[in-house]
Image: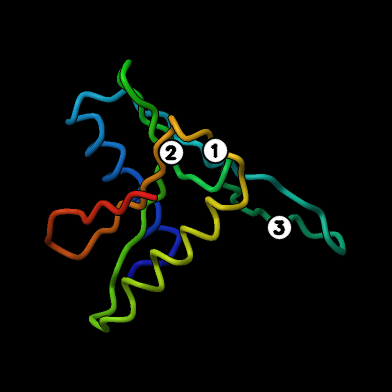
Amino acid sequence: MASSVKKGNYYKRKSKEYYEKLGYVVQLTEFCCGMVIKGRTIYRKIDIFGSDGIAMNGKEIIFWNSKALTSERKEALTEVIGHTRIEFAKYPFPKSVKRQAIIWKPREKPIIYEY
């Protein structure tokens, strides 16, 4: 079984390719920073404005966050959507900017949820 970091990177890359196929220019917005705690360096990934990437095509700008949905529970989709809504709510996005969760289920097309 792949680590959660590998899964996350896989779905971010898949999301980036998805938007590029739709004609968007895409940039990933996650970066890694290191902190030294008790003599050890600990790395942490940080999303810029709660998003994994930004896609734009001259007509619109989309801040997107990719999520993998591995659970078959009906509540899992609601939890993922709610978590992303909370992250996006932390920032004052203008109404002209779209915010989307791109949710991936294994071997299926993505579910796009817009906020």
Residue furthest top in the image: 58
Residue closest to the eye, 52 or 115: 115
Please tell me whether mark 2 or mark 1 is closer to you in this view. Answer: 1
Answer with the quarter of the image where residue 27 lies.
top left
Residue that label 1 marks = 93
Please tell me whether mark 2 or mark 3 is closer to you in this view. Answer: 2
Q: Is residue 18 above or below residue 45?
A: above
Say left or right for 93 vs 20. right
Residue closest to the eye, 110 or 107: 110
Say left or right for 101 vs 23. right
Mark 1, other Cα within 10 Å: few <14 / some 14–19 / many ≥20 = few
Q: Is residue 37 above or below residue 65?
A: below
- Three-letter amino acid code at the position of disc 1: Phe
Query: Contact, CB < 8 Å: mark 2 with mark 1?
Result: yes
Residue furthest front in the image: 95
Q: Which numbered dot is residue 42?
A: 3
Mark 3, other Cα within 10 Å: few <14 / some 14–19 / many ≥20 = few
The image position of residue 89, as x and y in percent, is 56, 53
Q: Which one is earlier in the sequence, the residue at label 2 or at label 1?
A: 2
Q: Please name the residue shown 39% across and 50% down the image.
A: 115
Q: Please name the residue shown 22% across and 39% down the image.
A: 18
Q: Which one is earlier in the sequence, the residue at label 3 or at label 1?
A: 3
- Three-letter amino acid code at the position of disc 3: Ile
The image position of residue 91, as x and y in percent, is 61, 44
The image position of residue 26, as x and y in percent, is 36, 28
Residue that label 2 marks = 63
Determine whether the residue tagged by mark 2 lies in a helix, strand or loop.
Answer: strand
- Three-letter amino acid code at the position of disc 2: Phe
